[in-house]
Image (cartoon, grey):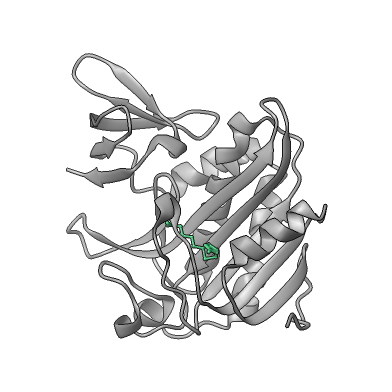
Amino acid sequence: PAVEYGLEAPFSIEYHDSVGSTNERARALAVEGRADVAVLADEQTGGRGRLEREWASPSGGVWVSVVTRPEISPSRAPLFTLAASVATARAAREASVDARIKWPNDVVVPVGESGEYRKLAGALTEMEGETDRIEWLVVGVGINANLDQEALPDGATSIREEAGDVDRRRFVQRLLEEFDRYRNDLEGVVSAWRELTLTLGQRVRVDRPAGEVIGEAVDVTGNGALVVESDDERVVVSAGDCEHLRPI
Ligand code: BTN
């Protein structure tokens, strides 16, 4: 059952020791008409990632989903995902982790100067609405917080591994405060994102349903799409179309 979490956050908090998926629970609240609520869990038994992937969510992580009802067009929704990534990276940096962002929504930690990185957190946004108006938006973020390496998938890291355990209440508080700030400043999201990203300037390969794009990641648009420049053209890739991005 949901219990008091004891935070002075800009969202009301519904906390579960264990839940299937905080995104699922947040969707149910959204459908009931709720707004500005954050669903938190110590453990998820059916955590979901992007593209129908499973998301390992053992006890000790931070699994959180926020319900909002922004008055924006659906084409701007990816900015909410960027806002969540920026908020997560900033909260992790305050916890002494060298967190950076890999477009569109991964928070990663570079491994030395090698150009490689490990994944610390990811975001999953779901929404309902018309073509010109969003009804509700659920932004879920999963952060490998106080977890041992053995509990993590390949290629992942945790706050514990990078910098030692974090006070999860404080971390969630800062995450929600930063998310609240950027959801009210969608123009500022892209510049905050630019400061933290690893992706711009990299040569990348992006897999999309329409085929792969190879080139230099040169910019993000005002709506959070990635601009990739290849030999003879510039391709704009929306977050929803990105199946996989890797530096080459
Ligand atoms: C990804 O990188 O694929 C996105 C992962 C998103 C995981 C979070 S954990 C909280 C919320 N509930 C879920 O089931 N998924 C998101």
Question: At 60% across and 61% down in the image, what residue appears?
Answer: 23
Picture quarter with the N terminus: bottom right
Where residue 247 sits, quadrant-wise, is top left
Question: At 67% across and 65% down in the image, what residue appears?
Answer: 25
The image shows residue 136 at horizontal and vertical percentages of: 72, 45
Front residue of 6/219: it is 6
The image shows residue 215 at horizontal and vertical percentages of: 22, 29
Going by the image, does 187 lie left or right of 36?
left
Going by the image, does 216 lie left or right of 146?
left
The image shows residue 3 at horizontal and vertical percentages of: 76, 83
Q: Of all residues shown, which one is farthest toward the top?
A: 232
Front residue of 57/164: it is 57
Question: At 64% across and 77% down in the image, what residue appears?
Answer: 170
Going by the image, does 223 lie left or right of 56?
right
Q: Is residue 103 visible?
A: yes
Where residue 107 sits, quadrant-wise, is bottom left
Q: Is residue 177 visible?
A: no
Front residue of 137/109: it is 137
Picture quarter with the C terminus: top left
The image shows residue 64 at horizontal and vertical percentages of: 60, 67
Question: At 45% across and 46% down in the image, what residue appears?
Answer: 195
Is 159 placed above or below 22 here?
below
Q: Of all residues shown, which one is farthest toward the right?
A: 33
